């Protein structure tokens, strides 16, 4: 399966909102292909670890809040599905 993973970063009054979207390029997520875990990292250190149950929509968008961080910091998201397929995306906080 091929996946497209993207990160969107929005500044807010209390820090940053981090959104990660995952889309499958070929078809819907069949039950056996569901995303099971996502790790959000700031400069290599995990700040959010998201575990999913057995219900996840097609092309999910997952959001977390980051209270710390500064322009130039690296945000990365790593995910794995139930069949051990993996994906990643990286983005820097803009100035």
Image (tube, rainbow, N blue to C red):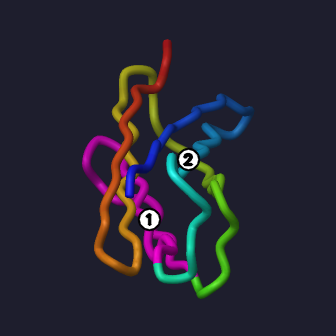
- Outermost residue to the right: 13
Please state the horizontal and vertical placement of residue 92, each as a whole percent of the image. Answer: 40, 26
Identity of the residue drawn at 40% across and 30% down: 91
Asked whether residue 91 is drawn in magenta, I would say no
Please state the horizontal and vertical placement of residue 8, each as a whole percent of the image. Answer: 58, 34
CB within 8 Å, label 1 to label 2: yes
Identity of the residue drawn at 51% across and 46% down: 25
Q: In which quarter of the image is residue 37?
A: bottom left
- Outermost residue to the front: 26
- Magenta-highlighted residues: 33-52
Q: Earlier in the sequence, mark 1 or mark 2?
A: 2
Main SS category, magenta section = strand
Identity of the residue drawn at 37% across and 21% down: 72
Which quadrant, please, contains the N terminus?
Answer: bottom left
Q: Which of 30 and 51 is in front in this view?
A: 30
Q: How many marks?
A: 2
Q: What element carries label 1?
A: strand
Asked whether residue 43 is drawn in magenta, I would say yes
Q: Residue 38 carries which label?
A: 1
Q: Mark 2 points at which residue?
A: 20
Q: Which mark is residue 67?
A: none
Q: Which of 28 and 78 is in front in this view?
A: 28
Q: Which of 5 and 17 is in front in this view?
A: 5
Q: Which of 21 and 66 is in front in this view?
A: 21
Please state the horizontal and vertical placement of residue 68, each as a whole percent of the image. Answer: 50, 42
> In the displayed structure, does residue 44 sit left or right of residue 79?
left
Distance from the alpha carbon under mark 1 to that under mark 2? 9 Å
Please state the horizontal and vertical placement of residue 62, each as a whole percent of the image. Answer: 62, 56
Identity of the residue drawn at 49% across and 18% down: 94
Circle 1 packing at 10 Å, graded few (<14), some (14-19), many (20+), is many
- Please determine whether, in this image, residue 52 is positioned above or below residue 12: below
């Amino acid at each position: 399966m091929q996946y497209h993973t993207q990160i969107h970063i929005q500044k807010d009054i209390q820090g940053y909102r981090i959104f990660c979207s995952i889309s499958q390029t070929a078809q819907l997520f069949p039950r056996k292909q569901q995303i099971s875990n996502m790790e959000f990292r700031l400069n290599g250190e995990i700040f959010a670890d998201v575990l999913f149950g057995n219900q996840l929509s097609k092309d999910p968008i997952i959001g977390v809040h980051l209270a710390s961080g500064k322009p130039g910091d690296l945000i990365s998201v790593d995910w794995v599905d139930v069949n051990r397929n993996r994906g990643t995306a990286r983005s820097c906080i803009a100035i």
